[in-house]
Amino acid sequence: MAFLTRKKTLIKYLIVLILIIFAITLTSKLTSSENQYNPVIQKHLKNAFGNSTPKEEILYISRYQDAVNNMKYIMDKLGYEVYNLVPWYAPNKRPECFDNRACSTMFTAICRKYKYIIVNDIVSDGYGYINSACSSKIIFELNNRYDVYIPQEEKEEFNVKFGTSLVNEKKDISIVLQNSYENYYACKKGIYIPYYYNIGTTGYYNELSYDIIQSVEKEDIIAVVEETSQDSLIAKVELLKRDVPVEIVPWKNCNPRTLAKYKAQLILPSHVTSRKIMENFKHGIVMMIPSEAFFREMVRETNQYSFDSPNIIKMDEGLEKYTDWYNDDMEDLFVFFNSWDDIRGLLHSVNFDKVRTKAKEFADKQELKVIEQWREIMSEKPSNKYIIHKKKPICKSNEGHFYNYSNN
């Protein structure tokens, strides 16, 4: 009996050794652009093959440091440790192992190490996990269009795989939407999302506090952050025409510490939402944005104005429903201007301290809600207080069909 036990143990260790050697061989064949991540991948694989019991750790797959910081802040309050893995391939590319069918072993091994895997922003970064026998709970955090960066020739295959995974009861997949427009967009593309959460950000920024920002003396100057061409081609030009004091802030320097000295930040919305909204609310940075009517006018009549979802402008209440800028819950938290001529007067007539205080109170309540929403997602027995269930698609697909839903 002792001999048989030793023999089984020896065989077990030999299998583990073979798998580790295979993993090292696999990662050594990555392209030169992927080689820098070999140690990271090998570490995951080595630990995964050597330990079959998932740890209470979270693998957070993200290419964006602000998103990583936000998730670490949330999960620290919930008692989880977050490990960030930056994909070792370009957003519009698949890893080389995908072509030789060796990816499945690698992704399955990583799944053995982590109980939870969260894929941030770029859904295709999680394609390997839904395409393999992954035992982890996969959470897609959609802050962008679900098919962003997917090459046209791969979209059909991707839609089939991603869509069917959402209705596959054998897979433990959750969808987190930062904005409800992402659900509408997916629906028009033929993807039905039956269950999802609407969860925003906390506004956390590198341990920076509201009191620190408010200790900075404010100047009667408007900041325009140069994120898009319209910021310099429209906002800067129109303000200078009217002798409104303005400074252009490079996008790379856009943070609460940099913006603290300005009376307000003027923003021409280019996306349905921005993580900077809650970041500014949390730290007392007042935002001036065009009124809904003036925004519609500029998008329709100004060639230089770019908005990533112009179709919602044509919808009844599309801006209120699908953007955070014009959401009814936030209407008292921005300073709206109806024309460029309004701005100078608003600088002296608006009680900026009152707006700042209300926005901070909103951000504090939002943070508590966000943490409770994530607590529900991570729970073994969720209360389902925050989950949203749609029994059928919310729209008519532009594709003429759905990849994962049928009336039959």
Image (tube, rainbow, N blue to C red):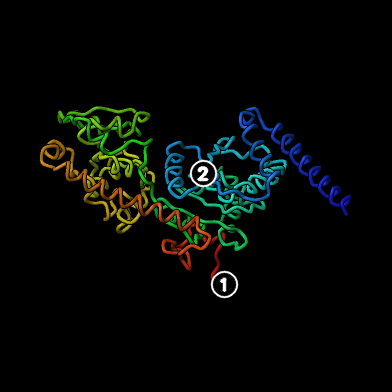
Q: What residue do we see at 45% from left, 53% from top? A: 374
**Nearer the observer, 169 or 22:** 22
Q: Quadrant of the N terminus?
A: bottom right
Quadrant of residue 173 in the image? bottom right
* 167 up-or-down from 65: above or below: below
Residue 274 % position (x, y): 36, 43
Read off the residue under disc 2.
81
Q: Earlier in the sequence, mark 1 or mark 2?
A: 2
Image point 57% across, 62% down: which residue? 167
Residue placed most toward the observer, 153 or 347: 347
What kind of residue is marked 1? Answer: Asn
Q: Hey, which residue is sitting farthest bottom in the picture?
A: 408
Horizontal and vertical percent for residue 130?
61, 52
Q: Which residue is mark 1?
A: 408
Instruction: Indicate the quadrant containing the C terminus: top left, top right, bottom left or bottom right.
Output: bottom right
Q: Please give left or right for residue 211 compared with residue 153 in the image.
A: left
| Circle 1 or circle 2, nearest the eye | 2
